[in-house]
């Protein structure tokens, strides 16, 4: 599945680069996203199978370096390519990378995990989850953009009901998309819930700061992206170290500390004197990145260590799905808060990379909306620390088969 995902992602990237219109681009992005989902959903499971329990935190931490380094390189390369060759070029760069990744994975990766024979897909569960989440976010976004009315509120309610029906069905079907029985394992459920809340807390950080850099500081899109690098550097520096130490001393303290550090950074942003120089923003960005780095590797290792060996694939998929769900919810809420204060035409111009100048009134409204968003992020990160701390003492030592030793 990992190899197939790489191939589908590469195909989707190629199709995106030749999209004749916006609708086809969205459809081809769905193809690309499907491939990416297959890669990311199996990533943690492959690492867990490949490394012993005493080295998984370190392995996932090193994986963080690769992922974040790729994001930084992609950010810079994407900005340069877009500036000189147009938006299609950002998909061209994926083609050689995707071909190499597909070939390398096919020749070097070996199947060492335990397969569960006879399991089938859960089309009803998958459909309800996608429909429910999509409708909820659609209602939230359209309501924020055009004003709330019964129709948009109804769409959100239908979305929530679909998600509730999804949970009910997942408890009844033989082969669920999400194995809810895994939530009976304390370390797994604690890690998953803290992961979801942490994703909600940090999912919109980049969006909000880029909007500030472009809308308030009047910087171009490439420069605004580059100014986020301190967050990524801190993430890379602290992630592997936290993963290594959690292998020795357990995940609970490190994961919880990371969330508290992130929370303090977000609360700092919520009272920050925006309009001051960029240099004053660097420290809270570093704190936010460090907190995320300290949290992610130990928490991911704790989740995978808690899952039985024959459920690692579905555990990895559940974790990846909920992380992305949290990020989508974060973006939806942030955009809704900003759209309630700032004209949508202004937000669209900033999002498109157009340099705009906000008048003092709009700027004050925009900064106030930013403060609300960061305050909400800080609360989510603080709440996430509760389930993180509730996992087993020192992360509870786990056996190779999953479960407490």
Image (spheres, helix red, strand yellow):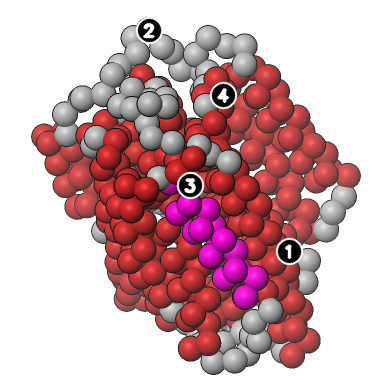
Q: Identify the residue shown where x is 33% and y is 53%.
A: 245
Residue on which the image places disc 1: 337
Q: Is residue 101 left or right of residue 2?
A: left
Q: Is residue 241 left or right of residue 231?
A: left
Spot occupied by residue 297 in the image (x, y as percentages of width and height): 38, 50
Spot occupied by residue 55 in the image (x, y as percentages of width and height): 26, 43
Which residue is more in the foreground, 24 or 61? 61
The answer to whether residue 40 is above or below residue 63 is above
Q: Which mark is residue 228?
A: none
Query: Closer to us: mark 1 or mark 3?
Result: 3
Compare marks 2 and 1 and give the one earlier in the sequence: 2
Q: Is residue 73 left or right of residue 335?
A: left
Compare marks 1 and 3 and give the one earlier in the sequence: 3
What residue range appears in magenta? Answer: 251-269
Q: Identify the residue shown where x is 58% and y is 41%.
A: 390
Residue on which the image places disc 2: 118
Residue on which the image places disc 3: 252
Distance from the alpha carbon under mark 4 to that under mark 1: 36 Å
Q: Is residue 212 visible?
A: yes
Circle 2 — which element?
loop
Compare marks 4 and 3 and give the one earlier in the sequence: 4
Q: Are marks 3 and 2 in contact (CB under 8 Å)?
A: no
Q: Identify the residue shown where x is 41% and y is 75%.
A: 230
Is residue 185 on the magenta stretch? no
Q: Are marks 1 and 3 in contact (CB under 8 Å)?
A: no
Label 2 crowd bin: few (<14), some (14–19), many (20+), radius 10 Å: few
Circle 4 — which element?
helix
Query: Closer to us: mark 3 or mark 2?
Result: 3
Query: Closer to us: mark 4 or mark 3?
Result: 3
Q: Which mark is residue 184?
A: 4
């Amino acid at each position: 599945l990992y190899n197939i995902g790489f191939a589908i992602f590469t195909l989707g990237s190629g199709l995106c680069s030749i999209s004749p219109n916006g609708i086809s681009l969205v459809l081809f992005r769905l193809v690309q996203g499907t491939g990416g989902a297959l890669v990311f959903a199996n990533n943690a499971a492959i690492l867990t199978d490949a490394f012993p329990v005493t080295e998984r935190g370190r392995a996932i931490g090193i994986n963080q370096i690769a992922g974040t380094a790729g994001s930084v390189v992609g950010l810079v390369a994407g900005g340069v390519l877009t500036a000189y060759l147009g938006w299609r070029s950002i998909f061209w760069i994926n083609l050689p990378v995707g071909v190499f990744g597909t070939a390398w994975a096919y020749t070097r990766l070996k199947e060492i995990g335990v397969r569960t024979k006879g399991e089938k897909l859960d089309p009803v569960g998958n459909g309800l989850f996608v429909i429910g989440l999509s409708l909820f976010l659609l209602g939230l976004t359209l309501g924020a953009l055009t004003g709330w009315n019964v129709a948009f509120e109804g769409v959100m309610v239908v979305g929530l009901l679909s998600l509730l029906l999804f949970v009910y069905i997942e408890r009844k079907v033989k082969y669920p998309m999400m194995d809810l029985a895994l939530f009976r394992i304390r370390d797994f459920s604690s890690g998953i819930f803290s992961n979801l809340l942490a994703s909600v807390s940090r999912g919109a950080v980049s969006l909000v700061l880029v909007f500030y850099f472009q809308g308030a500081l009047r910087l171009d899109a490439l420069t605004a992206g580059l100014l986020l690098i301190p967050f990524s550097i801190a993430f890379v520096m602290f992630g592997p170290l936290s993963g290594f130490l959690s292998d020795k001393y357990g995940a609970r303290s490190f994961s919880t500390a990371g969330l508290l550090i992130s929370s303090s950074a977000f609360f700092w942003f919520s009272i920050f004197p925006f309009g001051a120089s960029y240099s004053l923003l660097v420290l809270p960005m570093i704190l936010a990145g460090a907190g995320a780095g300290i949290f992610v590797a130990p928490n991911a290792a704790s989740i995978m260590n808690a899952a039985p060996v024959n459920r690692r694939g579905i555990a990895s998929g559940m974790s990846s799905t909920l992380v992305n769900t949290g990020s989508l919810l974060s973006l939806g809420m942030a955009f809704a808060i900003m759209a309630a204060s700032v004209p949508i035409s202004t937000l669209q111009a900033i999002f498109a990379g157009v340099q705009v100048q906000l008048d003092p009134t709009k700027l004050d409204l925009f900064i106030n909306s930013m403060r609300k968003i960061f305050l909400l992020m800080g609360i989510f990160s603080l709440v996430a620390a509760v389930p993180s701390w509730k996992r087993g003492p020192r992360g509870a030592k786990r056996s190779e088969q999953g479960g407490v030793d």
